[in-house]
């Protein structure tokens, strides 16, 4: 049983079954400027892109250009 709500299988028309897949980890890509990069955040781990990634327990790719 993969689903957190307890559903293991759903039957629909023509006796076709829908089986839930495993939950995959959320992935986020941040594209932006110096704020996205972490300018003026004090610590790299406190920039908003890192904070959002930690909040959602997501893997993230941060592509930002400062300047």
Image: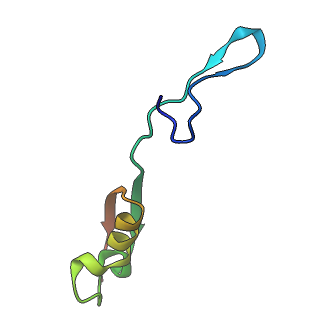
Residue at the far top: name it: 14
The answer to whether residue 24 is above or below residue 35 is above
- State the residue in front, 32 or 6: 6
Horizontal arrangement in the rendering, residue 47 relative to residue 6 (left or right)? left
Residue at the far left: name it: 43
The answer to whether residue 57 is above or below residue 26 is below
Residue placed at 40% from the left, 64% from the top? 30
Res 66 seen here: no
Res 43 seen here: yes
Number of marks present in the image shown = 0
- State the residue in front, 10 or 35: 10
In the picture, residue 5 is in which quadrant? top right
Q: Quadrant of the C terminus?
A: bottom left
Residue at the far right: name it: 13
Horizontal arrangement in the rendering, residue 20 relative to residue 34 (left or right)? right
The answer to whether residue 4 is above or below residue 28 is above
In the picture, residue 56 is in which quadrant? bottom left
* Residue 41 picture location, percent across and down: 29, 87
Residue at the far front: name it: 6
Residue placed at 47% from the left, 32% from the top? 2
- State the residue in front, 34 or 47: 47
* Residue 65 picture location, percent across and down: 31, 73
Horizontal arrangement in the rendering, residue 15 relative to residue 22 (left or right)? right
- State the residue in front, 29 or 52: 52
């Amino acid at each position: 049983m993969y689903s957190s709500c307890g559903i293991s299988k759903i039957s629909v028309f023509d006796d076709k079954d829908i089986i839930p897949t495993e939950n995959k980890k959320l992935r986020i890509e941040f594209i932006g400027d110096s704020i996205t990069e972490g300018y003026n955040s004090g610590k790299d781990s406190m920039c908003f892109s890192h904070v959002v990634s930690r909040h959602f327990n997501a893997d993230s790719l941060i592509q930002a250009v400062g300047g």
